Amino acid sequence: MRRFLLNVILVLAIVLFIRYVHYSLEPEPSNQPDTYSNFSSLAENEDPADYDISYQEKKGSKVLIMSPHGGRIEGGVSELVRYFNDDYSTYLFEGLKSHDNQTLHITSTNFDEPLAEEKIKEHQYVVAFHGYKGENKNTLVGGTDRKRAKMIVRALEKRGFSAELASSQSGLAGLSADNINNQGETGLSIQLEISREQREAFFDDFYYKDRKYTKTSEFYSYVRAIKHVLEKEYS
């Protein structure tokens, strides 16, 4: 019996260690400068197999739901974007490296991947998902469409989420005219910066390959709150 318990403890320790390694391969964005200042520099130096660019058209969609930091760059945002595939056009730039995906991070004011630029200009509104390091569950809602950003905050709070309007002085507010989010037909955008703690709560298993299979009720409550506002305001 004692040997059995020791074996169980050993297995659990190994599993926890493996998960720790997986998580450590997806660090959150740092304050260090980006490796590349634009997409052409990234494309010249990175293996195309290490990232993926995807766009799904929804005929008649006024809104483009997107993230330039999907996959293993800012964990969990790809799954949020893909939730909206059936109702809105979506775009993702995703990091697929086994490690060091932060080299693929291009800040939104410098992000100029050609397909993203083309498709954003074909839509009236942009909703962008991002992640930040925060240790507490929280969402900072920014973007140039401050009216709808406030509505998103209220919708999330109504469902029990911690959310606040990003200060216009914050680097996470998404207000710059150079921000890829603000290149649509109207220039109106909503930018959601979601803390690591909150994104982890969206999944039973935060490991990259398992996230799409382990979405929690918290994930669905969150995206439905956002969808309700989009349906009401952008239909």
Image (tube, rainbow, N blue to C red):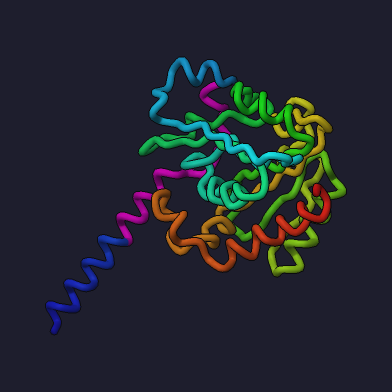
Specify whether 203 is left or right of 218: left
Give the residue at x 33% y 61%. 16
How many numbered marks does the figure carry?
Answer: 0
Give the residue at x 73% y 40%. 60
Q: Quadrant of residue 17?
A: bottom left
- Toward the right, the furthest residue is 147
* Figure check: 217 above or below 130: below
Can I make out residue 170 in this image? no
Q: Nearer the viewer, residue 160 or 30?
A: 160
- Toward the front, the furthest residue is 59
Q: Position of residue 55 (x, y in %)?
A: 57, 35
User: Which range is magenta?
Assistant: 16-37
Give the residue at x 18% y 74%. 6
Q: Please tell me whether residue 32 belongs to the stretch shown in magenta.
A: yes
Specify whether 174 is left or right of 209: right
Say which quadrant the N terminus sits in. Answer: bottom left
Can I make out residue 4 in this image? yes
Q: Quadrant of residue 8?
A: bottom left
